[in-house]
Image: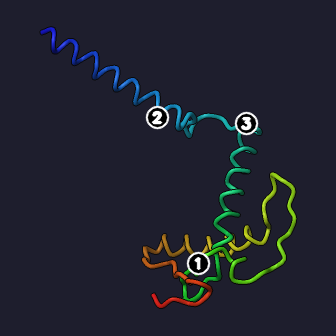
Amino acid sequence: MKTSIVRGVFLFAAGALCAAVIAGVNPRTKDEPMTPKLFEQRAQHLLAELADLGRYAGPVKNGRWVIYQLPVDACVTPPQPTVPPPGVNPVALEAMQNGLGPYNAGLIAGRGDLISLMEKCHPVDP
């Protein structure tokens, strides 16, 4: 009996710890109201992530999004705009905007193999 009580306490503590970790990772639920400050923070984080991915994004060809193995500025040297933080590179952001729509349409249609890799600035056969 003593063992089962101790075991129950440990299992309860482990469950409570897991719940605390999950609550710390995702403190917001979908039903909570959005504040302007939280929206701005999340939008800036999203812009930074999109611009970072945009450095690898290429054109959409034959329904497949071409991505570069190395950042595009390693293949060509386009002029990089100077952007004051928290703004992001508009060229990289536009590369993502151009590819996300067709990529999402392919996901909705259930197509596979939507991304093509270009290694070292040369096309790679799929």
Instruction: Report the residue that reaches farthest toward the top.
Output: 2
Residue 99 horizontal side relative to residue 5, left or right:
right
Q: Looking at the image, is mark 2 or mark 1 earlier in the sequence?
A: 2
Q: How far apart in space, not on screen, are marks 3 and 2 (Cα)?
A: 22 Å
Q: Nearer the viewer, mark 3 or mark 1?
A: 1
In the rendered image, which quarter is residue 76 located in? bottom right
Q: Is residue 79 above or below residue 37?
A: below
Crowd band around label 2 with a 10 angstrom C-alpha radius: few (<14), some (14–19), many (20+): few
Residue 66 horizontal side relative to residue 72, left or right:
left
Give residue 1's position: percent from left, percent from top.
12, 9
Residue 99 horizontal side relative to residue 83, left or right:
left
Give residue 107's position: percent from left, percent from top.
48, 71
Q: Which of marks 3 and 2 is in front?
A: 2
Instruction: Confirm or deny contact between disc 3 and disc 1 (CB under 8 A).
Output: no
Residue 10 is labelled as none
Classify mark 2: helix, strand or loop. Answer: helix
> What residue did someone put label 3 on?
35
Residue 67 is labelled as 1
Which image quarter holds the C terminus? bottom left
